Image (cartoon, rainbow, N blue to C red):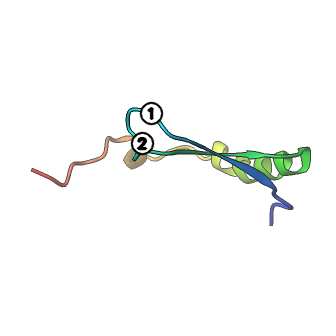
Amino acid sequence: MIGPLVVTREVLMPMRDPDQRIVIYRPVNADSQAALNRRTAGVAAKKPRAAELSPPRCAFR
């Protein structure tokens, strides 16, 4: 449990490619920011494995 989390959502749509979307979630208050910080603290401390650093393989040939 990381605590209460309240976010706002913003959707950006490129004018030249309206089928694409970028969705941004932002904390609305200090408690939500602290909850996100607690959630990501363990992720940031984890070192990536070699497999996570290698480029993705293309399935199409």
Quadrant that contains the N terminus = bottom right
Q: Position of residue 45 (x, y in %)?
A: 66, 44
Q: Residue furthest bottom?
A: 1
- Indicate left or right for 40 with 21 as reference: right
Q: Residues within 10 Å of mark 2 (few under 14, many from 20)?
A: few
- Indicate left or right for 52 with 43 as reference: left
Report how far apart the C-alphas of labels 2 and 1 lie in the structure: 6 Å
Say which of 61 and 47 sits in front. Answer: 61
Q: Residue at x 45, y 33 (%)?
A: 15
Q: Count of labels shown? A: 2
Q: Position of residue 56 (x, y in %)?
A: 30, 46
Amino acid at pointer 2: Pro
**Residue placed under numbered mark 2 in the picture:** 18
- Indicate left or right for 50 with 11 as reference: left
Amino acid at pointer 1: Met
Q: Residue at x 50, y 44 (%)?
A: 48
Q: Position of residue 59 (x, y in %)?
A: 19, 55
**Residue placed under numbered mark 1 in the picture:** 15
The quadrant in which residue 10 appears is top right
